[in-house]
Amino acid sequence: MPTKKTSPELLLVSNDSSLIEATRNSLASNGPDYLNVIKGSRETLNRTIDATRPQVILLDLNYAPEPIILIQELVNKYPQIAIIPILSEERMVDADKVLLTGARTFVKYPYQQDALTITVSRAIAMMRTEALFAPAQETESLNKRSYVFTVFSPKGGAGTTTAAVNLAISLHKQLGEEVLLIDGKRLFGHVSLYLNLRTGNSLTDLIPHINLLDKRIIDQVVVPHVSGIKVLPSPLSIPDGQGIRPDDLFKILQALQLVYPYIIIDAGNHLDDNSVTYMDASDKILLVANPNIASLRDARQFMEVTATLSYPKEKTLLLLYQAGRRSDVKKEEIESILKMKVFGIVPADENQALASLNEGVPLVIRKANHPISRAFKSVAKSLVQVIRSSDIRADENSINAKNKRAN
């Protein structure tokens, strides 16, 4: 006879009565079936976790004097549990530090609409998916740090494919390391067309091997390009594309990150569960926007969506594409409208862009000194700075955590 489950799916760690009540109310309608709350000192925390074994821990960042160190310790000790810190408005400045600890994500308090429920549900789903995907890997591979950048625009025709292709090649030249370019569009992907790749391989070829993916299988599917990058094309048929599920993508990305140190994804302009899966796995999202009112309106709405997904604002980098026309909205106005700095600017030259597409030769190769090519190289340099800065912060956090434990 089956026994009834008594351990909580979710453990809330907080001494703030208002936050506890708000969390209960937010999860009351459609949250986890089992909720437990722990108050008091930090000394009882590990004992409670060991006794209850929750799937998710919601940790109030104000619970402990040194919360970043506490999160790091919990992540290291309980890798099978999703740690989700709760950040109040004044603690949002710590969002980047929180994510560098290895926390699954974070949620902002006071909670916005269904943000808490969505975050918890997605965390549970992702942890269950990870549990299904646990291939044997060498310790050295597991310790590799892979960087993922998703290129997305909520407006069709904004230039995500052009940006993803040219940035992948530019990043490869900057770093001298392997870069994988993924055509993340389930339907009507054009990366192969832009690169003049004639191949029958596609992302769907990896799905039958989903639980056994390794470098040998991946190498048989990805396609090398003369520029030096590797390419994972989009599905070749509509039925194949429609059959791709977020769980499949998550497993594939897990495997690819163990093989490639740098991954750029052209996620197109369709916001759905699959594109969100790409964004979840990404270190940064490159939001492509044109300097006109329609594109900027869509970009602002997208930033509102990222808030509901509990992404820190710093996760999204704004890339202005096809800029420089007299009628364009000015850079200062754009930053005011979107309340974010412009990360990079790529000038407009429709004739050259069209010629590159028709020839199947990216502009950074076809005309390396063209202003557009120089702009993409500049953006790639800025991405390298982001990568280096992230490496430094991760190393500092790791050293600080070790020093604290030693003391």
Image: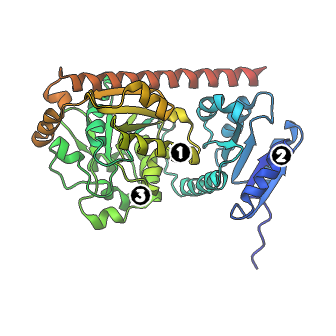
In the rendered structure, which disc, 3 or 2, sits on the residue that comes first in sequence?
Answer: 2
Residue under the image location 29 percent in, 36 percent down: 163
Q: Between residue 393 and residue 176, name the one nearer to us.
A: 393
Please rate how many residues cluster around mark 1, counting C-alpha atoms within 10 Å: few if below 14, some from 14 to 19, many from 20. few
Name the residue carrying label 3.
Answer: 210
Residue under the image location 65 percent in, 53 percent down: 113
Name the residue carrying label 1.
Answer: 304
Which mark is nearer the camera, 1 or 2? 1
Q: Check disc 3 and report its element: helix, strand or loop.
A: loop
Name the residue carrying label 2.
Answer: 18
Q: Quadrant of residue 241?
A: bottom left
List x then y, in percent, for residue 298: 42, 45
List x then y, in percent, for residue 210: 41, 58
334 displayed left or right of 398: left
Please rate how many residues cluster around mark 3, counting C-alpha atoms within 10 Å: few if below 14, some from 14 to 19, many from 20. some
Image quarter in which the N terminus is found = bottom right
Please rate how many residues cluster around mark 2, counting C-alpha atoms within 10 Å: few if below 14, some from 14 to 19, many from 20. few
| Contact check, label 3 and label 2, Cβ < 8 Å | no
398 displayed left or right of 205: right
Image quarter in which the C terminus is found = top right
Q: Amino acid at mark 1?
A: Glu
Q: Check disc 2 and report its element: helix, strand or loop.
A: helix
List x then y, in percent, for residue 170: 28, 27
List x then y, in percent, for residue 248: 43, 58
In the rendered structure, which disc, 3 or 1, sits on the residue that comes first in sequence?
Answer: 3
